[in-house]
Amino acid sequence: MDSDYAIRFTIRGGRIARYQIFEDSLLIAMARHSDAIARQARLNEVLYGWDDSGCGRTIIFLHGLFLNRQFWAPVIDRLGEGHRCVAFDMPGHGVSPWLNGLDLDGIADDLALWIVENGAAPATIVGHSQGGMIALRLAGRHPDAVKRLVLVNTSARPEYPERIDAWRARRGALLDTGS
């Protein structure tokens, strides 16, 4: 019996970082290909990872709590040509490590710096959940950096100080146990 095989390589730093072997046509068709370039930069002592793809007006995607930039991949894939799509890993998620003392205002300030330094202003900011809370702060603190906001399942409320310790404990438990 014959089968089709495909091998998909992910290259980082000129080396194979990961490979996947797909067998049969259905799995080959389901293999996601992305032309996004994975990048990293340090902004105000925080290391951010992001994917950058396409050309045109910039749309920046900010994921919610306990997710990473891959959350936006299906949306970015459907946007097609005509947009520059940038999806960030928020600090403490994906390849972006957490920095103690960082808050949502600090992240918004970092993103504003990135927008200015990369000539992306004004950008459309799409934020999901906590990413939307960061997007609101970004627009409020740096209105020249933002053309429009798209908020998905987010809240405009401030973070309550009494909840922060509980969130940190939940985050620690999740990272320690994976559930």
Image: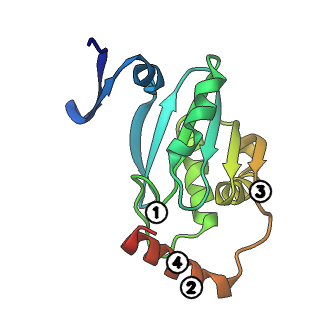
Q: In the image, which is nearer the foreground, mark 3 or mark 4?
A: 4
The answer to whether one can see residue 120 in this image is no
Q: In the image, which is nearer the foreground, mark 4 or mark 2?
A: 4
Q: In the image, which is nearer the foreground, mark 3 or mark 2?
A: 2
Q: Distance between the residues labelled 4 and 2?
A: 9 Å
Instruction: Provide the residue designation for mark 1.
Output: 92
Q: Residue 140 carries which label?
A: 3
Q: Residue 165 carries which label?
A: 2
Instruction: Provide the residue designation for mark 4.
Output: 170
Q: Is mark 2 on a helix, strand or loop?
A: helix
Amino acid type of the residue tagged 4 in the rendering: Arg
Q: In this view, does 32 lie to the left or right of 125?
A: left
Q: What element carries label 1?
A: loop
Q: Residue furthest front?
A: 1
Amino acid type of the residue tagged 3 in the rendering: Gly
Q: In the image, which is nearer the foreground, mark 3 or mark 1?
A: 1
Mark 1: few, some, or many residues within 10 Å (few <14, many ≥20)?
some
**Up-down relation of residue 143 to residue 1 (above or below):** below
Mark 2: few, some, or many residues within 10 Å (few <14, many ≥20)?
few
The residue that appears at 32% across and 23% down in the rendered structure is: 23
Amino acid type of the residue tagged 2 in the rendering: Asp
Write down the quadrant of residue 35 in the picture: top left
